[in-house]
Image (cartoon, rainbow, N blue to C red):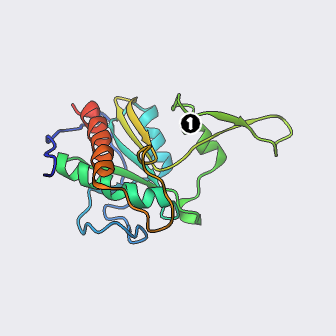
Amino acid sequence: AETVYPQVTITSPIEITIKDENPDLSGYQFFEDPDPVLKEITFTEATRLIEEGGSGLILYSATWCPFCQRAIPQVNYVAKQMGVTVYYVCLNNDAEHAVSTEELNELCRNLDWIEWEKDEANPDGAELPNFQIPLFLGVKNGEITGHHLSLVDSFSLVDENSQMNSDQIAELRGIYAQIIEDTAD
C-alpha cells in the first residue's frame, strides 16, 4: 500500500527567481514523471534564499551522480504528493552550471554540518567544504529545518543498475516527507 502524505503549504517572505519552470531532467535515467514539481534555480539563488530569510525546499543534484539518479524521482514523488515545489539546483559539469569556489564557500558557511578540509593544493592553508550530493534541504525563514544527504544507509550501489528495494524507497520518502513537514507553514 502506498503511503498517503499530507498536503502542506510553504510560503516564502522573499521572491525566488526561477531559472527554468520545466528543467531538462532527461539525463536522470530513472526519472519518468512528465509533469515534475521541480523548478530549476541557480546555485546563487539558492544561497540567497537561505541568506535573505526565504523559505523553500532545495535539491542539489547532477545527472552524473549515480545517487542523484535514484534520489530525484523520490524527491519529486513526495513533493508532488504533498503539493509543494522543490527548487532544483543542477550541478552538472558544464559552463551553464559552473559554481565558483567563492559561491560554494558562501553556501557552506550556512550549513553547519558541512566538514571543511585543508586544501593541499593551496599554499596558504585554506580550507574547502566537503560538499556532497544529492543534498535535499528544507529552509524556513532562512533557517535550515532539515537536510538529507545521499540515499539510505542500507542501500549499496553495486553497479549502474542497482536499485533501492521497496522498504528503502519508503524510508527515503519518509525522510523527505519529514523535511517537507518541518518546513511547512
Residue at (25, 54) in percent of width and height: 77
Q: Position of residue 171 (x, y in %)?
A: 31, 44
Horizontal arrangement in the rendering, residue 118 relative to residue 133 (left or right): right
Horizontal arrangement in the rendering, residue 95 relative to residue 77 (left or right): right
Which amino acid, by three-letter code, is at mark 1? Answer: Cys
Q: Work out whether residue 19 can be spotted.
A: no
Horizontal arrangement in the rendering, residue 177 relative to residue 42 (left or right): left
Q: Nearer the viewer, residue 55 or 52?
A: 55
Residue at (48, 67) in percent of width and height: 160
Q: How many marks?
A: 1
Q: Work out whether residue 31 can be spotted.
A: yes
Residue at (56, 34) in percent of width and height: 114
Question: Residue tagged by mark 1?
Answer: 108
Residue at (42, 46) in percent of width and height: 154
Q: Position of residue 178 (x, y in %)?
A: 28, 35
Q: Position of residue 32 (x, y in %)?
A: 29, 69
Above or below for 25 versus 75: below
Q: Position of residue 3 (x, y in %)?
A: 16, 47
